[in-house]
């Protein structure tokens, strides 16, 4: 007999412009039972996914294609969506409001 779970699978977006890193993060999340969307390589793609999908969390790189931008982090914070900043950028650039996410 097979049992069906009534627990909803969490959805997490992965925002990363380095394809190999993004695919690895998506793979790790997927193997952990999380529905991972991405990797999304641009702020526009990430903002669209956030606006058009139910997102439970996010893993985001701040430096996308050479541009450090906090639009994604700001939108997630305003929507009370938990996120992790995963970046090789200088973390001193991260605004105080996002330093403990």
Image (spheres, grey):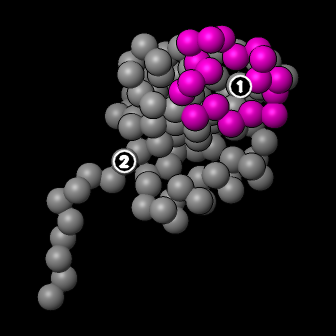
Looking at the rendered structure, the secondary structure element under dot 2 is loop
Residue 96 locus on image (x, y percent): 62, 11
**Residue highlighted by disc 2:** 10
The residue drawn where x is 43% and y is 52% is: 35
Image check: 33 left or right of 88?
left
The residue drawn where x is 78% and y is 42% is: 18
Numbered range of the magenta stretch? 84-101
Q: What's the CA distance linking mark 2 and mark 1?
A: 23 Å
Residue 43 visible in the shown view:
yes
Image check: 51 left or right of 6?
right
Give the mark nearest the N terminus, 2 or 1. 2
Looking at the rendered structure, the secondary structure element under dot 1 is loop
**Residue highlighted by disc 1:** 62
The residue drawn where x is 33% and y is 53% is: 9
Which image quarter holds the N terminus? Answer: bottom left
Q: How many marks?
A: 2
Q: Does the magenta stretch include residue 60?
A: no
Residue 82 locus on image (x, y percent): 45, 31
Residue 41 visible in the shown view:
no
Residue farthest bottom in this picture: 1
The one nearer the camera, 36 or 86, is 86
Residue 39 locus on image (x, y percent): 63, 43
The one nearer the camera, 96 or 25, is 96
Q: Reply above or below: 96 against 84.
A: above
- Do callouts 2 and 1 mark residues in contact (Cβ within 8 Å)? no
């Amino acid at each position: 007999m097979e049992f069906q779970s009534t627990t909803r699978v969490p959805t997490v977006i992965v925002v990363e412009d380095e394809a190999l890193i993004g695919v690895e993060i998506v793979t790790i999340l997927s193997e952990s039972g999380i529905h991972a969307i991405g990797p999304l390589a641009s702020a526009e793609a990430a903002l669209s996914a956030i606006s058009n999908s139910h997102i439970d969390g996010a893993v985001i790189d701040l430096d996308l294609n050479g541009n450090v931008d906090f639009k994604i982090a700001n939108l997630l914070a305003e929507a009370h969506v938990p996120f992790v900043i995963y970046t090789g950028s200088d973390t001193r650039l991260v605004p105080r409001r996002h330093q403990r996410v």
